[in-house]
Image (spheres, grey):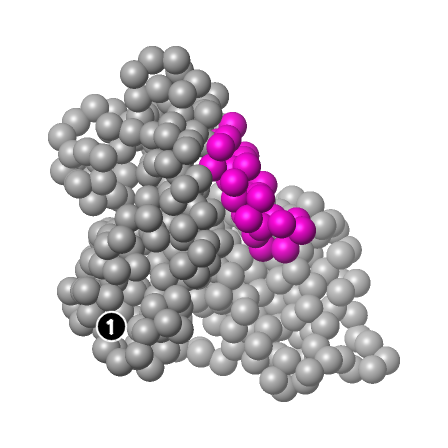
């Protein structure tokens, strides 16, 4: 979960979100935007990448307006800003404009450290968004997700969810949301089992497992059943992405015991053994092709296409075909 500094006003002139956990970075932005729009529903939000912020851009965006409108300016990957643009930002930090909140997203490493230091010196409200590489951190994240919704989940349920899903925070957050929406009362281990490790045909992870094993027909059958039983399409694309990424990560890792690889890759040891079985037949090119197919399906599921079910079917077939691309195993 994101950690904040003592200055916890999301409408502070400057918010600095530091880290590489995309979900937490996005939430840091959403918190500022929500607070700004609560204060002024007409708040203008500008969400920019480094290539969209040239010398002079910040001055233009923060110049006084005839209508004195509230504005949120978000700069993603601020560590990638050009040297001239960094000079502009540093100059602005010395005299921030009223009614404007600047949000800088920074990876937190050595690159762009001068801007990071300048923002901190200027008294930025800081939100820490570190990668959660330890299972204990992800477990704490799941517990906090349930607490935030006001719902109760047993420790065993939280652990089962982390074991089943792994290191993808977006998937963990989506799973918590789905459980909270679908289940009344305390969420226990049996509930998690029914959704994620119980009936195989209804699990998004079964779809992913059969696909990365090259078993297209079984994966498609599991997909159709999952959709028919109400599994959210976004959970299926997330499971597919996680399955393919696990293949890529393990295939490029150094050999070793499952426990050592689990620490290195952020997976539970049992998953290392499973992915090793699933790796047969995969090639680096196959991983790339499969990831592109899943990304296209994800865009379709999230509104980029007219038929999410067809987008998922295409992705499942593409992943299963990529799993057999090595021609061996």
Work out whether 7 lies above or below 314.
below
Can I make out residue 211 in this image?
Answer: no
Q: Residue at x 58, y 50 (%)?
A: 308
Residue 271 image position (x, y, % from top left): 22, 40
Work out whether 24 lies above or below 200.
below
Quarter location, residue 260: top left
Q: Image check: 184 left or right of 190? A: right
Query: Is 5 a magenta residue?
Result: no
Residue 158 image position (x, y, % from top left): 22, 64
Which quadrant holds the C terminus? top left
Quarter location, residue 251: top left
Q: Which residues are magenta?
A: 289-318
Q: Which residue is mark 1?
A: 187
Quarter location, residue 277: top left
* SS majority, magenta: helix
Work out whether 250 lies above or below 26.
above
Q: Image check: 192 left or right of 209? A: left
Work out whether 191 lies above or below 169.
below
Q: Image check: 286 left or right of 250? A: right
Q: Residue at x 38, y 44 (%)?
A: 222
């Amino acid at each position: 979960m994101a950690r904040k500094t003592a200055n916890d006003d999301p409408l502070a002139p400057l918010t600095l979100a530091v880290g590489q956990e995309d979900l937490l970075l996005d939430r840091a932005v959403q918190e500022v935007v929500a607070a700004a729009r609560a204060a002024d529903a007409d708040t203008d939000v500008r969400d920019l990448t480094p290539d969209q912020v040239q010398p002079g851009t910040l001055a233009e965006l923060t110049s006084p307006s005839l209508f004195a409108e509230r504005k949120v300016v978000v700069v993603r990957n601020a560590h990638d800003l050009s040297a001239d643009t960094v000079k502009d930002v540093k100059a602005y930090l010395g005299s921030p404009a009223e009614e404007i909140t600047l949000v800088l997203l920074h990876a937190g490493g050595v690159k762009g450290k001068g801007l990071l230091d300048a923002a901190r010196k200027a008294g930025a409200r800081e939100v820490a968004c570190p990668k959660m590489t330890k299972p204990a951190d992800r477990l704490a994240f799941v517990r906090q997700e349930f607490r935030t919704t006001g719902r109760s989940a047993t420790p065993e349920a939280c652990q089962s969810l982390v074991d089943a899903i792994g290191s993808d925070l977006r998937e963990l957050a989506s799973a918590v949301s789905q459980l909270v929406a679908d289940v009344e009362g305390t969420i226990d281990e049996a509930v998690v089992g029914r959704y994620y490790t119980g009936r195989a045909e209804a699990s998004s992870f079964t779809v992913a497992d059969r696909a990365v094993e090259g078993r297209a027909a079984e994966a498609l059958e599991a997909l159709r059943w999952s959709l028919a039983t109400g599994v959210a399409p976004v959970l299926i694309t997330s499971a597919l992405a996680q399955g393919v990424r696990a293949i890529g990560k393990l295939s490029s890792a150094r050999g070793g015991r499952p426990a050592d690889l689990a620490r290195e890759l952020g997976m539970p040891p049992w998953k290392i053994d499973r992915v090793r079985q699933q790796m047969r037949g995969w090639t680096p090119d196959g991983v790339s092709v499969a990831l592109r197919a899943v990304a296209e399906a994800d865009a379709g599921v999230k509104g980029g296409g007219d038929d999410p079910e067809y987008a998922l079917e295409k992705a499942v077939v593409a992943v299963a075909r990529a799993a057999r691309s090595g021609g061996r195993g």
